[in-house]
Image (spheres, rainbow, N blue to C red):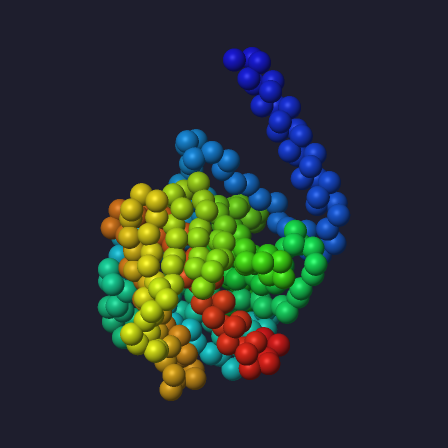
Amino acid sequence: MIKDLLKGAINHNKHEEIEQKYLSKLPKEQKPIKSVIHKHFDEELQPLTMINKSVSQLNGIQGLYIREIFILSNMFSWNTSNVFEIHEGDSYGKRYDPNSKPILYAVAKLNEFCSCDCQLMGTSSIAITTKLDDISSEIPYLFLKEKNVCCGYKLCDIFINQNGNGTLIGNIQGGYRHSLKINSSYLNNLSFYYPPCQCKCNQSSYQVIDDDNNQGILTLKLNCCDCANPYTYKVGFPPKYDTDLKILFMSVVIYLGYLNFQSRNRSKGSKY
């Protein structure tokens, strides 16, 4: 047992040394927030609600109705013209009340930055907040950091705010034909696949399933004639998912929303 402990300590110190050498090479403004991630699936995980109480916003919720909206004024220091309203929905993602207020918001800081170094953090930061204001955007309870997109498929880290520090709880890996896969110690390989054939030109349904055969719902609708509300997303959580897993599921949908936003604006030649 003592031998195993010594071996573990040596490996830990070696990992810390490699990490410090990597961080020292990054520009000061691009050094990532200190993060912690669970290394093993079999270790006891701390519930996310114990890390940040705002996670409880999804307690008992079966689904979400998420819509992209445009705010023309620069009310955010993050300087973006669109946000996402996150409403409570049923198990199919249908909004319960058309006049309901959002339970959460998402807002992004988008930068057209590209580098040949695939290790640099950087093109976008997405904050998931309980209020739509600058303070919540600067100190969100959940935020996503998209890494360099110049070297293959996209990769996005998911952080939860823990006493002012970012704790890494998973990452999202982009794939072929807009497929997405989330890796986290809290769940078992949740994947989002975009079917090649869709009957409706303005609506598509993703195949959502994890390695434990839990299936969810994600339906994306393009509102062609509504410039102020171009995309809506209907989310139905797998019945067995607890609050922690719902948070990770939601993070993937929000990230997908911003991928669509960036793609649409790049096609128009817009910087943002």
Q: Residue at x 53, y 52 (%)?
A: 157
Locate residue 60, reporting x and y percent. 27, 52
Locate residue 50, reporting x and y percent. 42, 42
Quarter location, residue 216 = bottom left
Any part of residue 128 in sight: no
Locate residue 49, reporting x and y percent. 40, 45
Task: Give the left or right position of residue 28, taking residue 220 as reference.
Answer: right
Locate residue 82, reporting x and y percent. 49, 75
Task: Give the left or right position of residue 90, taking residue 127 as reference.
Answer: left
Q: Residue at x 58, y 58 (%)?
A: 152
Q: Residue lying farthest bottom?
A: 225
Quarter location, residue 225 = bottom left
Task: Give the left or right position of residue 244, taking residue 71 as reference.
Answer: left
Which of the two residues, 163 or 31, is positioned nearer the viewer here?
Answer: 31
Any part of residue 221 in sight: yes
Q: Residue at x 59, y 80 (%)?
A: 270
Q: Residue at x 70, y 45 (%)?
A: 23
Task: Give the left or right position of residue 79, taking residue 201 as reference.
Answer: right
Does residue 131 lie above or below 201 as drawn?
A: above
Which of the two residues, 213 or 19, is positioned nearer the viewer here?
Answer: 213
